[in-house]
Image: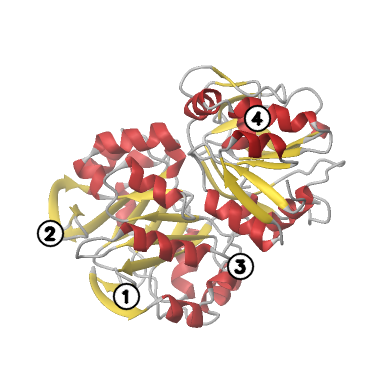
Amino acid sequence: MLTKRLIFALLYDNGSFMLSRNFRLQKIGDLNWLEDNYGFSNVGYQIDELVVIDVSRQKRDSAKFCDALKQLTRDCFAPIAAGGGIKTLEHARELLRSGADKVVVNSALHDQPDLVENLASEFGRQCIVASVDTQKIDNSYRVFKYNGTVETAYSLDQFLLRCAGLPIGEIYLTSIDRDGTSNGLDFEMLEHVNHVKDLPLIIKGGIGNADHIVAGLAENRVDAVATAHLLNFMGNGLARARELAISGGINLPKF
Amino acid sequence: MAKNEVVIVDYGMGNLWSVASAIKFLGKTPVVTGDLSKISESETLILPGVGSFRRAMNTIRNQSIDKAIFDSLRNPKSKLLGICLGMQLLGASSTEDGLTAGLGLVQNEVVRLANSEIKPIKIPHVGFNKVQMSKESKLFDQISADASFYFVHSYAMQILNDTSKYTTTTYGHRFVAAIESGQVFGTQFHPEKSQKNGLKVLENFLR
């Protein structure tokens, strides 16, 4: 039986790794900091997947990002999805040559659906993770683009319907409201994912402790939960969350 | 070619860095190359792959990589491991983007994952799943029966004839998770992404 997934997400900004709260970024540390506090050659055994996003708000240096990706993944034999500002096929190819198995697209879903088509015909749709950012405004879930800075004309339902028409492999859904708050995942947004019920669903935003992880993974509609909180699970926090989930009957792989 | 070298066939598609890292971790020297003479002289080949079957086969044919692989396998000491799409390419054909012939090193066909009428599945098949290991397996030697491996695919290789020859996984339907046929090996899952158990599969192949 296919297991659920606990995903750790890393937000990269020009050499640093960031903590995000409602999509506002705060610098936490560099690759050395990550190695000291998580030891990625070992953390691989505590997570099912790593997502690494270049969230640089200034000009992106994709060669530097690829180098960081290579360093991160050198002795980390876990699946990796990478992305952030992918605008060309070549950019995606570089990520896939630097340790990534899948590419994460967000703005391209809005601005370049043809690029998504091209990526899928080159790398297969299983390689495309569609990242969607949503925020609840006046009781309606709205979709945002450009790192959550621009509200689009779409409701979450409408946008996921649009995504369902694209050749993508997974949905990576982030609640902007919950992002970085540690208040727990937003389960209400799951009422709007019906159009993509045939695709694996990753949800993110709000995980503050192991109980939040277990609650997310226990949800039927959810295939994976992700946390990008760099401070909540330092040391062996992810390993303990994993143990708690497994002992609570969540179907996670045993490494 | 030096004994310790493992040629990772580069035809422009695939997570070459991860495969190379895993090979290095296991104490061998990865050589990532599309050079035909290097491929044909190698005794240990890995054919990785992420992407569309048709596109991959077109590239492999246009660059004569298929001939270089066949040349290598004429040496009885040579062995080849296809990973993910790389395993599918070993087969007779795939229906991805229209029917396309594969390398034909095994006779199995590749088709889109079929949904189960009883329990609907999400496609692609993404995540860690268990496998039913073939009894005579070299790849799964000393690996626990409840080990999980990382899959990410929408198409799968069909089982031909005798099920016991294959290591299989069931997702919707039962399909080939790993194939071992003489010099030719393949895994639908990514051993280089399957943590300790995956590294052990690679180590068993390299042995």
Can residue A95 be seen here?
yes
Q: Mark 2 sits on what residue?
A: A138
Compared with B207, B68 (above or below) is above
Mark 3–mark 1 distance (CA, rounded to whole Å)? 23 Å
Secondary structure of residue under mark 1: strand
Tag 3 and tag 1 share a subunit: yes
For label 3, count other residues whose C-alpha is less than 10 Å away and answer few (under 14), some (14-19) or many (20+).
Answer: some
Q: Which mark is residue A45?
A: 3
User: Relative to the observer, which residue lies in front, B76 or A157?
Assistant: B76
Tag 4 and tag 1 share a subunit: no
Type of amino acid at the residue the image marks with label 1? Leu
User: Relative to the observer, which residue lies in front, A236 or A39?
Assistant: A39
Chain letter of disc 3 in the image: A
Image position of A214 (left or right of A128): right
Q: Position of residue A237 (x, y in %)?
A: 52, 79
Q: Mark 1 sits on what residue?
A: A19
Secondary structure of residue under mark 2: loop
* Snapshot quadrant of residue A247: bottom right
User: Relative to the observer, which residue lies in front, B40 or B173?
Assistant: B40
Q: Mark 4 sits on what residue?
A: B68
